[in-house]
Image (cartoon, grey):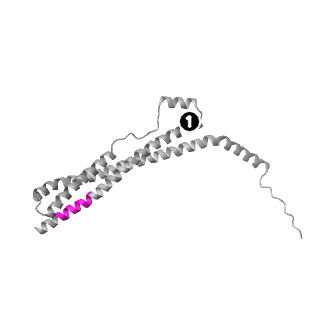
Amino acid sequence: MRVLLRPIVIFSKKPMIEIQKITHSFERNVPEDKWKFLYEYARKSLDEDLKRFQAIDDKAAKFLTLVTVVFGVFSSITPWIFENWIPPSDAISWFLIVLVGLTFIVLVLSWSLLFRAIKLIKAPRMPLTDSLIQFFWEKEFPDIYFALTKTCKAALGENRKVIKRKGELIKNAYICIAISAWLVAADVSLIILSKLNS
């Protein structure tokens, strides 16, 4: 027995006309929507970088507080060390004086790096000027979105340079903080060792 398959008609004429209307509407609106999407994407990228900028400043401020506390404690102990171990009488005393000096230098260096990291720098922002308002009156939406996207891109580039510079300063400060922590531990160990030997 032979079965004849007949094609099934999925769409009638009425839904086909609606699909054509939707397609035409979509084609008409895509250029504007595309530029709007690009602008929103660029703006979101800039906003995220500005948050990163703020997070770096916050981290630098916290590190600076820590280093300031350590520096204050170390500065109050240093005169006592110099009173008791100057002039140095043995190898441990000499080594302690050198380590204390080195600790002081590394703490000052980390302090300096952190101060440079939190230095006020003008963060790039989106402009709002009379010429921009005039531009809005004269141009169509795709042109406006594209111009704003280019402004976001330029601001993003500047912001990333600043973030990279601040990030390098904080990274170097962190290395100095870690070294100074080890030096402080070595200073304390030498003081204890010297007291045990005396």
Residue 33 on image: x %, y %:
60, 42
Magenta-drawn stretch, dominant element (helix, strand or loop): helix
Residue 80 on image: x %, y %:
12, 56
- Highlighted magenta segment, given as a residue range: 180-190
Label 1, secondary structure: give it: helix
Residue at 42% x, 49% y: name it: 52
Residue at 37% x, 41% y: name it: 121
Does residue 188 sit above or below 157 in this rendering?
below
73 vs 23, nearest the viewer: 73
Residue 10 on image: x %, y %:
77, 55
Residue 147 on image: x %, y %:
54, 37
Locate the N terminus and report the quarter of the image it occupies: bottom right
* Residue placed under numbered mark 1 in the picture: 144
Locate the C terminus and report the quarter of the image it occupies: bottom left
Q: For residue 20, which quarter of the picture?
A: top right
User: Which residue lies most toward the bottom here?
Assistant: 1
Residue at 35% x, 49% y: name it: 169
Residue 182 magenta-highlighted: yes
Q: For residue 195, which quarter of the picture?
A: bottom left
Q: For residue 178, which quarter of the picture?
A: bottom left
Residue at 50% x, 42% y: name it: 153
Q: Residues within 10 Å of mark 1 (few under 14, many from 20)?
A: many
